[in-house]
Image: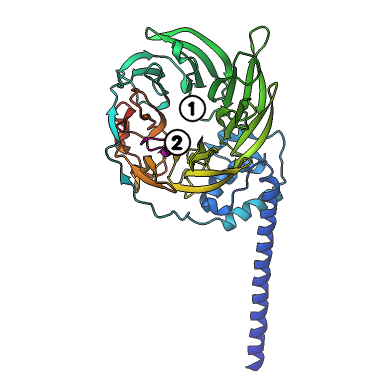
Amino acid sequence: MKLKYSNLLIITAFLVIGISAISVSCKSKEAEGEKLAQTYCASCHLLPSPDMLPKNVWQYSTLPYMGIMMGVATEINGLEKPLSDYAILRPASQMISDEDWLKIKRYYLANAPKTLDMPKYENLEELTGRFEIQKTSIAIQGATIPNFTAVTIDTINQKIIAGDQSNRVIWVLDQNGKPTQTITNQNALTNVDLTNAKNNQYLLTYIGTTTQANPDVNGSAEQVEIKNNTFVNAKKLLPNLNRPIEVITKNLDDSPEDELISNEFGFKEGGLSVWKKDAKNQYQKQVLSTQTGATKTIVMDFNGDKRNDILALFAQGDEQIILYLNKGDLKFEAKQLLRFPSIYGTSSFDIADINKDGKFDIVCTAGDNADFSTILKPYHGVYVYTNTGNFTFKQSHFFQQNGATKVIPRDFDNDGDIDLVSIALFPDNEHRPLEGFIYFENTGNDFKQKTLNINHLGRWSVIDAADIDHDGDIDMVLGSHPVAKFPAGFDQAWKQGSGLMILRNKTK
């Protein structure tokens, strides 16, 4: 018995040692995979941690996409649609060995959670007495469900200009939401520049025939005059753009004529560029960045040297906000202000003096949820970054909002401080449907979240805010985009109605 018992102890010891050795070996491989991820992935963007997505999303969606971007042939050859359509993004040669790629995959899959822990939702108090909800009455006989990709308030002419991608229509409405002009056979509109609105002239940005990710280079910027239900003197200033989100007119040098600034979101290629006319009156392109995801720019003198600088958001891959300081003669110095993990889904940004200290602060949203990880994410929402001086910023507020799409800072209640309004294209429609529209009332040191009961009226994709009726307060116009991927419930009511809505401010 003693001998058998001793043998059992020896066998048990060997098993414990073997299991420990396997555990140490696995941890060692995971550590090696983490180090490789930092080497290969963090060289291009801020490294996402494994706990930011569930294991199944990493395994079947995000990691295969990462494999495409690194040109891993064994990964690409096993792809199925729709991921296989993105194989055209692969680099000319494989950037990592198969062995190292497997180590990175093991690291993420071993450390990713089964599900993401979502925070307890904060109650949204109903906002009463501030806005009058006014539906528009646009209609096209035999039309499909409208998908609005742009909406702009022209306060000079008291008009609303909105682009419906599905029906290829640009609507012009008066301040009461009554259609005055319908311009058909138009590509998907993404921006309206109002620099010359006093002459009824507008610079329109078209992303192309569709907003869906694709390699086609058929976007453009066109100068138009809207008159008599059509475009008069339409002129294509910039053809063959790569999925542009925004083209704006600003003066960036000592010459009297304005330059154009383009944000090309792109597919495989994109970027931020400045366009200047040459002696032959042709626009010549100066590229500031070739990064995809160029989405929006804010142009003003940020450092007090009497030159216009460019503050830009890049919302794809290496998600970041960069300040391009104007050094004169269209030369710029890039300064990174904020950087986000590559899977955050940064979707919009704006600036305002939130804390009244005389410096601009940054508000932004994370919520793009249409690509390779269409699930609810606890880090989606509205962020406020306070300016601490010398172009440094510190996060001061975060408000969870699933699928947050755009935030607008304005003094909506005319009390002298900045409030916020945000919309969400991907709300949790099953458990928190009213988060599709959130009003953040500034209470001094914080914000009180409120909402309007308008979620059933639209799946809000675009919004603009301005005093359309010239009565001294800020109104809003919202556009709906019902047809797209959705992570949490679909409201059939979204398919009804016009898809455009006015929120008329009653503060005065």
The answer to the question of whether label 2 and label 1 lie on touching residues, with beta carbons closer than 8 A, is no
Badge number at residue 409: 2
Judge by depth and name the residue closer to the eye, 276 or 21.
Answer: 276
| Residue on which disc 1 sits | 211
Percent x, y of residue 331:
70, 25
Question: Dot 2, how many residues are within 10 Å of its Cα: few (below 14), some (14-19), or many (20+)?
Answer: many
Q: Start and end of the magenta stretch?
A: 409-421
Question: Dot 1, how many residues are within 10 Å of its Cα: few (below 14), some (14-19), or many (20+)?
Answer: some
Percent x, y of residue 264:
58, 26
Q: Nearer the viewer, mark 2 or mark 1?
A: 2
Percent x, y of residue 437:
37, 39
Query: Relative to residue 190, is residue 46 depicted above or below?
Result: below
How many marks the image carries: the answer is: 2
Quadrant where the image shows the N terminus: bottom right
Quadrant where the image shows the C terminus: top left
Name the residue rendered at 31%, 22% in the picture.
177
Q: Earlier in the sequence, mark 2 or mark 1?
A: 1
